């Protein structure tokens, strides 16, 4: 089983767990197992078209899967998968 | 509601003051109890935006990952993100909204002429098309430790 770390605000949709251990040989399989077990998580991670939301990054240990084989990245029992959002912003043209 | 403890608030003010006139950014760690968020620690990040940082900020996902690990190690939760608006109101701009994550509280600090003016907190909706203002409490008399 690989380990998935659940971000604090999403734990309410994952049985209040901060860690979920699931079977799967790739990141895609693991996330599929996660959202099958906790259906409410799906809309927070995926678009209606079934793609990972643009601000959702998935890490296997310290590596962003975009730099590996994306959702086909293989995982082993020793791996930890993290869900990490992209965040940016700024004041723009100040209005006040 | 989000309540920021004195130590965390002082660290956020210090970070905003040192970063001025650029925007600063960081994570807020604490607990959520009966819907009330309590921030006990602020983790300062480098602003990773490659362009002018007076009007923009960007967080490296690796920094956020590390903050989450720190929180888990210390029995805390990563509950929000803070950043500053130098010489501007603490509104949630279009850029803030479009580049936000709907999972977290977003505290915005207005820094005018290098001094703290006011702060707000925002909760983006899942589509990131609007953000609801969240009540925020912070120690009024705290000040930063910078020059």
Image (tube, coloured by chain):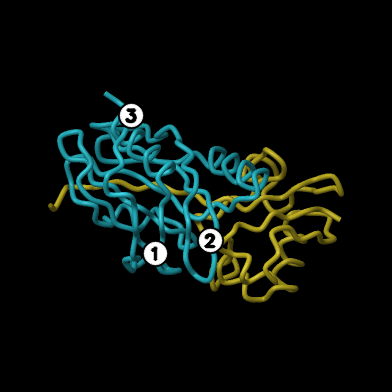
Q: Which residue is mark 3?
A: B145
- CB within 8 Å, label 2 to label 3: no
Mark 2 → mark 3, Cα distance in angstroms:
39 Å
Q: Nearer the viewer, mark 2 or mark 3?
A: 3
Name the outermost residue toward the left. A96
Instruction: Please tell me how crowded label 3 is: few (under 14), some (14-19), or many (20+) other residues with Cα within 10 Å.
Output: few
Identify the residue shown where x is 38% and y is 35%.
B49
**Letter of the chain that mark 2 sits on in the rendering:** A
Q: Horizontal and vertical percent for residue A87?
A: 44, 49
> Do discs 1 and 2 share a chain?
no
Mark 1 → mark 2, Cα distance in angstroms:
18 Å
Is B82 placed left or right of A69 in the picture?
Answer: left
Mark 1 or 3 closer to N-term?
Answer: 1
**Letter of the chain that mark 3 sits on in the rendering:** B
Per the image, label 1 sits on a secondary structure element best described as strand
> Do discs 2 and 3 share a chain?
no
Per the image, label 3 sits on a secondary structure element best described as loop
Q: Horizontal and vertical percent for residue A70?
A: 67, 49
Q: Which residue is mark 1?
A: B123
Identify the residue shown where x is 47% and y is 48%.
B28
Q: Horizontal and vertical percent for residue A28?
A: 72, 59
Per the image, label 2 sits on a secondary structure element best described as loop
Q: Which residue is mark 2?
A: A53
Q: Nearer the viewer, mark 1 or mark 2?
A: 1
Mark 1 → mark 3, Cα distance in angstroms:
29 Å
Identify the residue shown where x is 41% and y is 60%.
B2
Q: Horizontal and vertical percent for residue B78?
A: 55, 52
- Chain letter, yellow: A
Q: Is residue B60 above or below residue A94?
A: above
Locate residue B56: give its quadrant.
top left
Locate residue A41: give its quadrant.
bottom right
- Chain letter, cyan: B
């Amino acid at each position: 089983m690989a380990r998935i770390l659940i971000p604090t605000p999403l734990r309410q949709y994952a049985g209040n767990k901060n860690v979920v251990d699931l079977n799967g040989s790739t990141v895609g399989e693991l996330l599929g197992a996660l959202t099958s077990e906790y259906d409410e998580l799906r809309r927070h991670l995926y678009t209606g078209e079934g793609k990972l939301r643009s601000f959702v990054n998935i890490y296997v240990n310290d590596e962003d899967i975009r730099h590996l084989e994306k959702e086909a990245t293989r995982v082993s029992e020793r791996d930890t998968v993290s869900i990490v959002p992209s965040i940016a912003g700024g004041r723009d043209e100040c209005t006040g | 509601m989000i309540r920021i403890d004195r130590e965390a608030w002082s660290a956020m003010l210090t970070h905003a003051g040192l970063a001025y006139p650029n925007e600063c950014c960081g994570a807020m760690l604490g607990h959520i109890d009966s819907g009330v968020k309590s921030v006990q620690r602020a983790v300062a990040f480098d602003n990773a935006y490659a362009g002018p940082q007076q009007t923009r900020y960007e967080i490296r996902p690796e920094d956020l990952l590390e903050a989450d690990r720190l929180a888990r190690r210390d029995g805390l939760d990563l509950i929000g993100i803070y950043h500053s608006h130098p010489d501007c109101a603490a509104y949630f701009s279009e850029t803030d909204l479009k580049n936000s994550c709907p999972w977290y509280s977003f505290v915005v600090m207005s820094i005018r002429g290098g001094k703290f003016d006011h702060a707000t907190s925002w909760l983006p909706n899942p589509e990131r098309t609007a953000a609801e203002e969240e009540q925020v409490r912070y120690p009024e008399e705290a000040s930063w430790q910078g020059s």
